[in-house]
Image (spheres, rainbow, N blue to C red):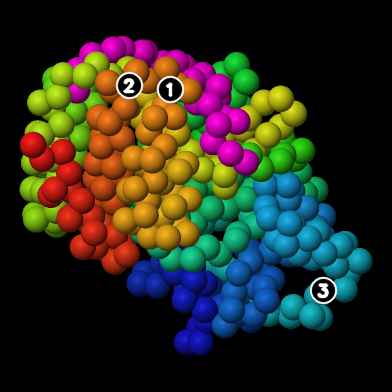
């Protein structure tokens, strides 16, 4: 394991948690003497550049791993996945990708306790699906990083997606998503949402399992095309109209800042002062449910309905308009950095009219969105996700000078 890809090493630690007094061993090659092999994955393309772990229990599962949900991906990714699926279906890839990751358990460990040490066994029990398998795409390490397991049965049928939160911050994200999926109950009107199949704690992790999405998905393009879906999400819970001061949303922001002061005192103080300035404004705001990460990679059309997943940052009492601003903020952030993303939020704020936000409230909604995004970043950093340096020191500069009389 000394030369494996950093992503693969991280995923091994987070999913199987070997080491110490654990009976679980994870090896590249044969299992240790006295161990029973319970999971077997092809490592693609190579352990030093690992990107996929493909279940090898059945060929049907190997093929389905790449074919399912290909419509959500980019054209290049979609083509690659289909080619790999065809290769596994024809039996051509076993020699091309010979490296195996083997998960085994000490044979002296009781079989009726395997769900205590293997997450797949635990999920199989929760979902009442024996012989559960998982395809795992190894994502780049970042403050949001969580293992995501695409669950399949031996015949290759999709069972759902499981997420594991392994830090303070990512555990909260996973639990937030479980709450949101439960509240949405599969969707509202024209918005399709994965159903919550299971959620809970396992060892040092929190997990949630959402139902599979349709396979005929086409990625959403353009925030304006999704504004009706945003309105439906916003009105799927309790809707209220009031000033920011005294709102449950402001109270939650203040509580979040108080909770992270020990790990980010300067940042929390600057953000709390900004919140106080915003609470002096008298503009009325409409509060409702937000998705929280409304970006193209989390949205796709299934016929006339918009499918939305990844509800980790959802809230049921956020100012209406946050999802619209987040789409534009995220695009500018990825392309041009934080300063450009802040300017983009201000540029598109007048278009909050599409969601019924009155002119007098739009500047406040824009500032609150930025404050919310900065608090989110601080919580991830202090909660074990690490500091995302491209945000600093720009974050503090914006927060300390914005909305000052």
Do the CB atoms of the residues marked 1 and 2 lie less than 8 Å apart? yes
- Could you classify mark 3 by the number of other residues whose Cα lies within 10 Å: few (under 14), some (14-19), or many (20 or more)? some
Q: Position of residue 380 (x, y in %)?
A: 29, 53
For label 3, the residue is 93
Q: Which residue is mark 1?
A: 353
Q: Is residue 31 magenta?
A: no
Left or right, 358 with respect to 254, comes to right
**Residue holding disc 2:** 359
- The mark that comes first in sequence, 3 or 2, is 3
State the residue at coordinates (80%, 75%).
94
Q: Which residues are magenta?
A: 221-244
Q: Is residue 224 visible?
A: yes
Element at badge 3? helix
Query: What's the CA distance linking mark 1 and mark 2?
Result: 7 Å
Residue 259: horizontal and vertical position, in percent? 15, 44
In depth, the one of 256 and 234 nearer the eye is 234
Residue at position x 51%, y 43% from top?
Answer: 295
Residue 102 showing in the rendered view: no
> Residue 127, position in %: x, y?
59, 37
Left or right placement of residue 325 versus residue 297 in this view: left
């Amino acid at each position: 394991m000394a030369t494996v890809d950093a992503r693969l090493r991280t995923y091994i630690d987070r999913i199987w948690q070997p080491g110490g007094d654990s009976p679980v061993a994870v090896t590249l090659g044969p299992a240790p003497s006295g161990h029973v092999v319970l999971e077997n994955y092809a490592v693609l393309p190579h352990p030093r550049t690992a990107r996929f772990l493909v279940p090898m229990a059945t060929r049907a599962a190997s093929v389905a791993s790449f074919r399912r949900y290909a419509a959500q991906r980019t054209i290049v990714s979609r083509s690659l996945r289909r080619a790999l699926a065809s290769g596994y279906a024809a039996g051509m890839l076993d020699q091309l990708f010979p490296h195996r990751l083997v998960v085994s358990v000490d044979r002296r460990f009781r079989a009726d306790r395997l769900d205590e040490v293997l997450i797949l066994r635990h999920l199989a029990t929760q979902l009442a699906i024996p012989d559960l398998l998982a395809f795992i795409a190894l994502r780049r390490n970042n403050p949001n990083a969580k293992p995501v397991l695409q669950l399949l049965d031996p015949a290759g049928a999709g069972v759902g997606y499981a997420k594991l939160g392994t830090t303070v911050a990512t555990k909260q994200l996973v639990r937030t998503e479980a709450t949101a999926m439960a509240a949405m109950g599969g969707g509202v009107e024209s918005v399709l949402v994965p159903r919550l199949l299971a959620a809970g704690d396992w060892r040092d992790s929190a997990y949630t399992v959402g139902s599979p999405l349709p396979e005929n998905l086409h990625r959403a393009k353009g925030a304006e095309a999704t504004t009706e879906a945003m309105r439906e999400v916003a009105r799927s819970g309790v809707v209220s109209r009031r000033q920011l001061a005294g709102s449950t949303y402001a109270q939650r922001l203040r509580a979040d800042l108080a909770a992270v002061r020990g790990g980010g005192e300067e940042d929390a103080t600057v953000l709390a002062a900004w919140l106080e300035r915003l609470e002096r404004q008298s503009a009325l705001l409409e509060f409702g449910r937000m998705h929280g990460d409304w970006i193209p990679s989390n949205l796709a059309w299934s016929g006339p309905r918009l499918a939305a997943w990844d509800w980790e940052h959802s809230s049921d009492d956020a100012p209406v308009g946050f999802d619209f601003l987040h789409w534009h903020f995220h695009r500018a952030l990825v392309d041009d950095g934080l300063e450009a993303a802040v300017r983009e939020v201000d540029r598109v704020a007048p278009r909050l009219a599409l969601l019924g936000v009155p002119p007098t409230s739009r500047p406040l909604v824009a500032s609150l969105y930025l404050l919310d995004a900065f608090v989110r970043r601080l919580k991830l950093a202090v909660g074990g996700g690490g500091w995302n340096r491209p945000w600093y020191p720009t974050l503090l500069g914006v927060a300390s000078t914005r909305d000052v009389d």
